[in-house]
Image: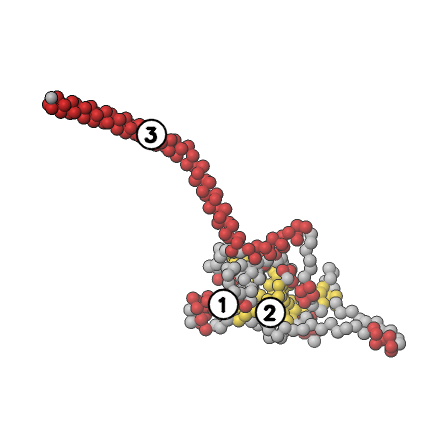
């Protein structure tokens, strides 16, 4: 009797195990089939959509890069946008600094000398003469050295940097000194001529700089691209007033140091980075002196010839 029960138990156990194995195998087979199906779907999607997905990622990266670029240079590009918008809408205003760039005499279309100072015709009665005398139109000379660019409405201090690092050829220290000086204005490049001297006077300034920089002059040359030939630039240096006229505008590579070289004649060179917000190239503005202390150099030469 016991032997029969044991035999039934063994038989039942064997049958139970066999059924369990079949179920496990079925599940394993189903799982494998699902894995194969998923793999086929992934393979089909990769082949069909990989280019589109890659293109989307590239576009998204470019958008983030552009947004980040404009956020870093927002103050400079706001000025550029306002300038272009005013030109487009015809709302450009003449800067009051234009008056500073005038000289005592200019030539008319026929080359004749035209004096801006008018002769005042006085009344005959003394009482009326007193009332007729106009207010004195005196120009105050700034106490510091400054550059004034009427076209872009800029009046900026000129900061000088020691030539010691240049003489020692310590370029890293020179760069640090110039970057520090640029926080307070534009910089007269050490080793170049001073205004009023024969040679090349080189002045450099930021077109844009990091927004977290503490300087107030990090985008003073952002609109330097708006200058055109014939525009005037005024420099106050050593209590003297020098007026220059732009003769040439060009873009060069940073390695082009020809713009820093001395010249046999007196000239002014302005340098800034371009495109705005990058360090790829340099915008070069070249100008020649036309007047000193309000008197035309041509007039001075004519007086010397007549004498």
Front residue of this view, candidates 295 and 58: 58
Placement of 267 over or under 23, stated as above or below: below
Residue ID at (74%, 67%): 116
1 vs 3, front mark: 3
| Residue projecting furthest to the front | 1
Residue 261 rendering spot, x and y as whole percentages: 51, 65
State the image quarter where residue 94 is shown. bottom right
**Which residue does the numbered mark 1 point to in the structure image?**
180
Please tell me the numbered disc located at residue 146. Answer: 2
**Tags 2 and 3 touching, CB below 8 Å:** no
- Can residue 170 be seen in the rendering of this structure? yes
**Which is more N-terminal, label 3 or label 1?**
3
User: Residue placed farthest to the right in the image?
Assistant: 125
Distance, label 2 to label 1, CA atoms, is: 18 Å
Q: Residues within 10 Å of mark 3 (few under 14, many from 20)?
A: few
Q: Position of residue 240 (x, y in %)?
A: 63, 74
Res 78 quadrant in image: bottom right
Rendered position, 143 above or below 23: below
Residue 34: mark: 3
Q: Residue at x 50, y 52 (%)?
A: 68
């Amino acid at each position: 009797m016991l032997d029969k029960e044991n035999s039934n138990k063994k038989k039942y156990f064997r049958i139970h195990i066999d059924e369990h194995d079949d179920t496990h195998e079925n599940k394993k087979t189903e799982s494998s089939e699902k894995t194969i199906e998923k793999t086929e779907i992934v393979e089909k999607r990769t082949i069909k959509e990989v280019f589109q997905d890659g293109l989307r990622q590239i576009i998204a990266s470019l958008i983030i890069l552009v947004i980040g670029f404009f956020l870093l240079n927002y103050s400079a590009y706001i000025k550029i946008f306002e300038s272009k918008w005013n030109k487009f809408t015809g709302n450009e205003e003449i800067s009051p600094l234009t008056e500073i760039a005038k000289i005592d005499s200019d030539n008319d279309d026929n080359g004749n000398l035209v004096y801006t100072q008018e002769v005042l015709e006085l009344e005959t009665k003394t009482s009326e003469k007193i009332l007729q005398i106009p207010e004195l139109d005196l120009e105050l000379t700034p106490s510091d050295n400054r550059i004034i660019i009427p076209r872009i409405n800029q009046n900026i201090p000129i900061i000088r940097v020691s030539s010691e690092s240049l003489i020692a050829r310590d370029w890293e220290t020179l760069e640090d000194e110039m970057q520090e000086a640029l926080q307070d204005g534009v910089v007269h490049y050490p080793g170049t001529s001073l205004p009023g001297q024969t040679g090349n006077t080189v002045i450099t300034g930021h077109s844009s700089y990091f927004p977290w920089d503490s300087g107030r002059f990090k985008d003073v040359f952002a609109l330097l691209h708006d200058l055109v030939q014939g525009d005037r630039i005024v420099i106050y240096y050593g209590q003297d007033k020098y007026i220059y006229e732009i003769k040439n505008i060009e873009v060069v590579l940073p390695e082009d140091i020809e713009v820093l070289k001395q010249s046999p004649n007196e000239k002014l060179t302005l340098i800034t980075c371009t495109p705005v917000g990058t360090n790829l190239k340099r915008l070069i503005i070249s100008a020649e002196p036309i007047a000193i202390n309000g008197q035309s150099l041509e007039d001075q030469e004519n007086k010397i010839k007549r004498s």
